[in-house]
Image: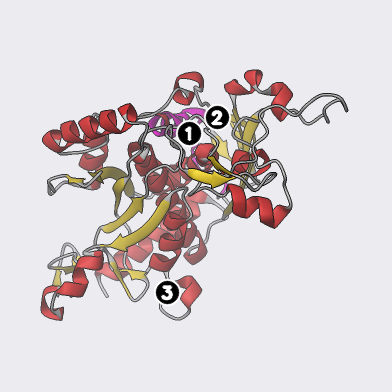
Amino acid sequence: MRYLTAGESHGPELTVIVEGVPAGLPLMKEDIDRSLAERQKGYGRGRRMQIEKDEAIITGGVRHGKTLGSPIAIRIINRDFQHWSRIMGIEPPEEEEEVKRKVTRPRPGHADLNGGIKYGHRDLRNVLERSSARETAARVAAGAIAKKLLKELKITVSSHVVEIAGIKAERYPLSAKEIGEAAGKSPVRCLDEKAAKRMMEAIDSAKKNGDSIGGVVEVVAEGLPPGIGSHVHYDRKLDARIAAAVVSINGFKGVEFGLGFAAAGLPGSRVQDEIAWDERRGYYRLSNNLGGFEGGMTNGMPIVVRGVMKPIPTLYKPLMSVDIETKEPFKASIERSDSCAVPSAAVVCEHVVAWELAKALLEQFPCDQFPVLQKAVEAYREYARGF
């Protein structure tokens, strides 16, 4: 299973083509639209989210509410394009017409300068339009298909915010389903109401000061049987693939599983998860310090993965940069931005993780027909329980 996205932030639309989804998976437009709507929520979002009302337009791969096994094509219209048609149109400008909104002052923390150097663009808008986090809407659409597949296989994936601007939320022993329900009711997707209030105050302060703030998000997945992934090759280790996918999200600079970096300060006796067995559950762990992974494979416990998002680098009090035309020092260009996108980033992370989980399952089990996949996964669960 794989996908490919196309489109620029202020272009006509985003497009995603998803290949390898089994035939016979129940899938409706609403399954994708729910995820797109969640991505657009979140305290601290900017004016762009007031303009866009993301909806999936499915143009291939689905008929009468079920996937066909052929590539699934989805379009997401950029409503803001109507204000950018002259700037982002595909037709070349008239010779005497000056290129509007040309960017020659790269923003620190963005892809602007590096991308310009790599591809030879003297107008850095050619870089920032594609490197924009707007592209994550297409990734969420692909992840929504993966979440639907996982749900039909009795696997639940949810996300929440555990930290913003150094404000840490209290941890609660909730299931993945409970986490998803509670997070969806919070403006910052935080389960701790007191911490959520302080987070919103920090976002307000950052916005007032023309600054931005980052945070930490957590994704929890329940229902995967043990042994998904592999220990035999580096590129088949599922936790490694999830780590790469999380860090590929715009602005993400770190990832950890279970105890994560905290494990470095503890003795092994307080880190490793002891093994137990009972007739109903089969094998299970007495703790989940390793976040559901051992040896690059799932161990049957809930998967717990966290990603850290840096503050958004587009600032309304811009940092110093250098104009690539004059080489003179200037304050960086200002593009419309959010003061905090951590709640939205949690939703993106959730769907990115769901994609990797679904992809690993399809690699391990027969996947041309969804009913066959369902039977194979359930049979494997029974096998693992009685091993």
Residue 247 versus residue 184 in the image, above or below: below
Q: Secondary structure at mark 2?
A: loop
Residues shaded magenta: 22-39
- Contact, CB < 8 Å: mark 2 with mark 1? yes
Spot occupied by residue 285 in the image (x, y as percentages of width and height): 17, 68
User: Quadrant of the image for the C terminus?
Assistant: bottom left
Residue at x 30% of width, y 64% of height: 382
Which residue is under mark 1?
32
The disc placed on residue 122 is: none
- Amino acid type at circle 3 is Ser
Q: Secondary structure at mark 1?
A: helix
**Given the current orientation, which residue lies at the most extreme front position?**
328
Closer-to-camera residue (364/233) = 233
Q: Is residue 96 left or right of residue 1?
A: right
Extreme residue in the right direction: 95
Amino acid at pointer 2:
Ala
What residue is drawn where x is 29% and y is 49%? Answer: 216
Badge 2 is on which residue?
Answer: 56
Give the amino acid type for the residue marked by disc 1 in the picture. Ile
Instruction: Say whether residue 197 is left or right of residue 110.
Output: left
Q: Can you see residue 198?
A: yes
